Image (cartoon, helix red, strand yellow):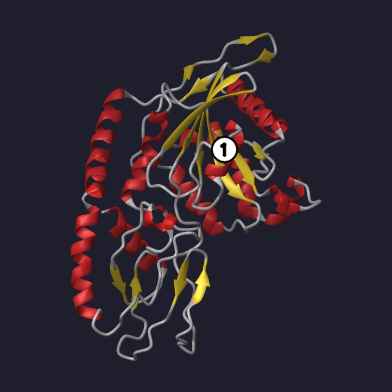
Amino acid sequence: MNSLSLTVIPSLSMSGDSLHLSELRIMLLGYKGAGKSSAGNTILGREQFDLRRTALCVKRQGEVAGRQVTVVDIPGWWANQPVKRTPKLVKQEIALSVSQCPPGPHTLLLVIRLDASFTQLDRRSVEEHLELLSERVWIHTIVLFTFRDCLGDTTIEQHIESEGKALQWLVEKCGNRYHVLNNENRGDITQVTELLEKIEEMVAGNRGGHYEIKREILEKKEERNKGEKERVKKRPMTLQKRSETLRSLVGREYSEPEIMFQRSSGYGFLSSPSKHHSKRPRINANFRFMPLLSDEHKQKTLFTSDTSNPESQHSSTSTPETIAVVTKLTPETSTEFTETLYR
């Protein structure tokens, strides 16, 4: 897999054993629903990041504990899915994310939820997505655990030990650097200052290094990314044409969409269909699910956004029209649908 060529250059002023960075540049990376945007808001101490998902990097800045802090929220991937199933635009955003905070980020915070098991599939997924940057990224990475409240009286060390080899491998790969944030308790500034101090300690261990992308590589990647973004801009017109075709095929038989696209779950697109094919909708987050009844259309599924939901209407994956018909609900199907959205 092609990766960016990164150069480490000094950026840290130290006096004796003490160190303090007047400026910190941070990237947040992880799977969808891990809590990246909330973590960014906690670090900056205010609501800077929109919690609705986006396919593009978002940068915010603020002063935190006497430091000028830049935070870049990078689009996530579907949990435990391999990189080949991640949309091309998202992969390019990850690869180019280091250019969002010039001359380069001091650290990458890999965000992991504590209320969900971290499996070998998750481990491989994380490893593959970080390879979009380079192998060197690991020496600049800290595991940032979210949803601290779910542990109760259990310490983070006890959790890592009991969770299994996959999580232990990840923590060791990051040089045993980790931190826990409770995004529900943003008034606790101590948890943020401790994180910044851990970042400074890591930077000192890296001899003050940060990432810098070679200009020629950056220009080539950005040109390719620009082409993808142009395709995204044209997407609504394309989807409308597809919608008209699909409606001509199934619209006469069904007056309303049978299945609403689930955007809010970080673990998959849809719930499993009812074995009895009940007409009664099941509420699932911002969307509803209703299986098809016709034997002829058995297992066929209609996707659309929920236009009655204000949040859905402003989502980057929303369209008021029917946009895809699939024949089987599998990870591959979900990925095909996601790829369609980013075309």
Q: Most extreme residue toward the right, as rendered?
A: 153
Of residues 251 and 238, the one nearer the viewer is: 251
Is 31 situated above or below 102?
Answer: below
Q: Residue at x 69, y 13 (%)?
A: 18
Q: Residue at x 63, y 16 (%)?
A: 20
Label 1, residues with CA under 10 Å away: few <14, some 14-19, many ≥20: many
The answer to whether one can see residue 223 in this image is yes
Q: Residue 173: horizontal and vertical position, in percent?
A: 58, 41
Q: Quadrant of the N terminus?
A: top left
Mark 1 secondary-structure assignment: helix
Q: Residue 121: horizontal and vertical position, in percent?
A: 52, 58
The answer to whether one can see residue 176 in this image is no
How many labels sit on residues?
A: 1
Name the image quarter holding residue 197.
Answer: top right
Q: Residue at x 70, y 49 (%)?
A: 160
Name the image quarter holding residue 184.
Answer: top right
**Is 169 on the left-hand or right-hand side of 82?**
right
Is 95 situated above or below 16?
Answer: below
Is 198 situated above or below 146?
Answer: above
Q: Quadrant of the C terminus?
A: bottom left
Q: Residue at x 68, y 8 (%)?
A: 16
Q: Would you name the residue on which mark 1 appears?
A: 41
Q: Residue 133: horizontal and vertical position, in percent?
A: 41, 37
Name the image quarter holding residue 196.
Answer: top right
Of residues 317 and 31, the one nearer the viewer is: 317
Of residues 71 and 159, the one nearer the viewer is: 71
Residue type at tag 1: Asn
Q: Residue 148: horizontal and vertical position, in percent?
A: 70, 48
Q: Most extreme residue toward the top, as rendered?
A: 15
